[in-house]
Image: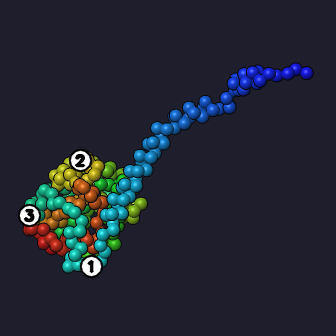
Amino acid sequence: MSTVTRKQVKSTAGTRPRPPGSVAARRRQRRLRPLLIAVGVVAVAIIALGAIYVRSTSGGSGGAAGDGLAGRYAFQVGNPGPGKPAPPIKLPSTAGGMFDLASLRGQTVLLYFQEGIMCQPCWDQLQAIEATWSEFQALGIDRIVSITTDPLDALKQKVALEQLTTPILSDPGVGVSKTYEANKYGMMGMGMNGHSFVVVGKDGVIEWRRDYGGEPKYTMYVPVPNLLADLRAGDAGGAR
């Protein structure tokens, strides 16, 4: 019967083969590491956007301007502002055909420049306005249209999904939006709008304006009671 020395045992143990697949597993981990980092970055971005949205939608509800709801959301008043002629708008509409602002002379029109399809708070804003439209009419506003930089076909699909009746205008070249400087107040750069509301009076002159989308808070949604309160508070040259 053969005997095995301690030295032989040690030598045999030192040459023990690695478990099958261990090298491949480490290679897979190295390949997956960049993907996991990217997923983490996206998750952080989504959480940050969610925090901005929650902060934007958490202010005031109910009441009128006298209840202190006006001015709760930081804004600027861009150019052209109250007292200046509204630049022409001729853009394709989700309602069909071309929208022409000049054709609505004699009506008071609320323009809502917004970020577009990827901004769900923008669509929530429109739904909230439609649900309380009688309150805007009580302030003398006859129509509302919204302007984004998305293609018309995509906007038609979004409008159908959200079950909206508001005409959405497609301004992919940002040409009209630039004439209102509405692309200066968003968090996505100069190629998209922010969150600007402009009231054009019956004579084609701007009566009221609020640009809510700028730094540092990047407001994406203004609760309707606060928006109505700001409308009532008015601007120089355009109190409602």
Rendered location of residue 231, percent (x, y): 19, 71
Q: Which residue is at 51% across, 38% downward?
A: 32
Quadrant in the rendering for residue 113: bottom left
Q: Please tell me which of labels 3 and 1 falls first in the chain.
A: 1
Badge 1 marks a residue whose secondary structure is loop
CA–CA distance in space, label 1 to label 2: 35 Å
Asked whether disc 3 touches disc 2, contact meaning CB atoms under 8 Å apart, the reply is: no
Q: Residues within 10 Å of mark 2 (few under 14, many from 20)?
A: some
Q: Please tell me which of labels 1 and 2 falls first in the chain.
A: 1
Taking the image as shown, residue 54 lies to the left or right of residue 70, namely right
- Nearer to the camera, 109 or 67: 67
Q: Is residue 49 visible?
A: yes
- Nearer to the camera, 26 or 204: 26
Tell me the residue that label 2 is attached to.
190
CA–CA distance in space, label 3 to label 1: 28 Å
Quadrant in the rendering for residue 7: top right
Q: Please tell me which of labels 3 and 2 falls first in the chain.
A: 3
Q: Residues within 10 Å of mark 3 (few under 14, many from 20)?
A: some
Tell me the residue that label 3 is attached to.
83
Quadrant in the rendering for residue 116: bottom left
Looking at the rendered structure, the kind of residue marked 2 is: Met
Q: Residues within 10 Å of mark 1 (few under 14, many from 20)?
A: few
Tell me the residue that label 1 is attached to.
63
Looking at the rendered structure, the kind of residue marked 3 is: Gly
